[in-house]
Amino acid sequence: PTFAHHLRAAGYYTCLSGKMHFVGPDQLHGFEERLTTDIYPADFGWTPDYRKPGERIDWWYHNLGSVTGAGVAEITNQMEYDDEVVFLATQKLYQLSREQDDASHRPWCLTVSLSHPHDPYVARKQYWDLYEHCQALNPETGFIAHDEQDAHSRRLYHASDYPSFEITPEQVRRSRQGYFANISYVDDKLGEILDVLERTRMADDTIILFCSDHGDMLGERGLWFKMSFFEGSARVPLMIAGKGVHAGLIETPVSNLDVAPTLCDLAGIDIAAIAPWTDGQSLLPLTKGIERTAPVLMEYAAEGSNAPLVAIRDGRYKFVHCELDPPQLFDLEADPLERDNLADDAANAGLVAAFMDKVQARWDMAGFDAAVRENQARRWVVYPALRNGAYYPWDFQPLQKASERYMRNHMNLDNLEESKRYPRGE
């Protein structure tokens, strides 16, 4: 079950506007209502194949055209999507505000999921110009030659079709400028949502949780996009604001796995009741100064990999393991740019062994690999079969009843106008 299932079971109205990468026929996963379709496919077409190591699936794998094409535009596929996502989310907030005084009013959870910031690195001029003289347009760690990269980064080099592109320093700077610009675009979109909450008198009774699914390497080490455990890819923002949440900056590593138990804790749901269904922990104790010692666990088994990779962030250290590769160990306090792999030094053999014990305690790597391969193989049978002949895609189709919108002849005009107004009597 998802956090939407848990909240809905507790009486919440749960609604999704935006991207969620649901793959398969269930396009709700606990949400009572969904306002948009997804920006990406819901079928099994985006499936790697570990039976063909090193294969590059041209029609959906990332490529560096996002870098060479970085620049300015007033509309793109992703802008069109995110504009729609936020517009429909604010319309839903207006609707929820009108229902505040109804006897049947339920608490609600609205999930608004944007695609930005994301490749392609294209931004509207008003945001692009903000970063014209930004001091961070050059990567801190420059291009690392292919032969000097770690094994997984070499795979990503080929998965992103690096050999087909000549990337210039100016293209790197423009790509980073476009990405930074789209962070400001997201800031404005979030501002639109917060503004509606304020104007509809709901802000004081609403808790905001902001997070992201991944970052972007943005040319650091010569890498782009996500798909790795380096900080640029794996480290993301997570912010909580609202009544009862203590303000402050917390440096303790946490995980998106913690979002579900945190939301449930905020909603007053018994954490013990959801414990069997989550590997995360509520973040509320951490916001109150209670120390957290649990390590952060990460997994990757998708584009650019030939076997599952796992990572553990425990205190100052990050350990990365793949059955195909030499281990990686970084001290993020002494080496925040992850330039020195401590696992290469025999003096750290004891620390590496201790992390390997943690990996083996948490994961059955052979079983993990077998499960991924079986799942991929099933998808490679199902996907082409379903595309042969009549095709019934799983992409979510939002439905609206035109006969129940605005003014219709079965409605009382006076009652309608009054019910659609909020605030009332001012």
Image (cartoon, grey):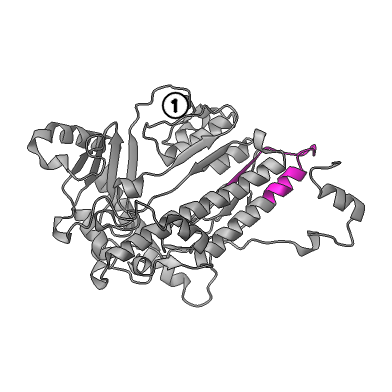
- Which region is colored magenta? 92-111
In x, y percent, where is residue 220? 28, 53
The reply, left or right, for residue 321 in relation to residue 235 is left
Q: Nearer the viewer, residue 250 or 35?
A: 250
Q: Is residue 275 visible?
A: yes
Quarter-wise, where is residue 48 in the image? Answer: bottom left
Q: Nearer the viewer, residue 372 or 284?
A: 284
Q: Categorize mark 1 by other alpha carbons within 10 Å: few (<14), some (14-19), many (20+).
A: some
In x, y percent, where is residue 47? 37, 62
Residue situated furthest bottom in the rendering? 389
For residue 106: magenta?
A: yes
Give the structural element (helix, strand or loop) at label 1. Answer: helix
| Amino acid at dot 1 | Leu
Q: Is 181 located above or below residue 193 in the figure? A: below
Residue situated furthest left in the rendering? 346
Q: Nearer the viewer, residue 40 or 392?
A: 40
The reply, left or right, for residue 207 in relation to residue 288 is right
Classify the position of the C terminus by image quarter. Answer: top right
- For mark 1, what is the residue? 286
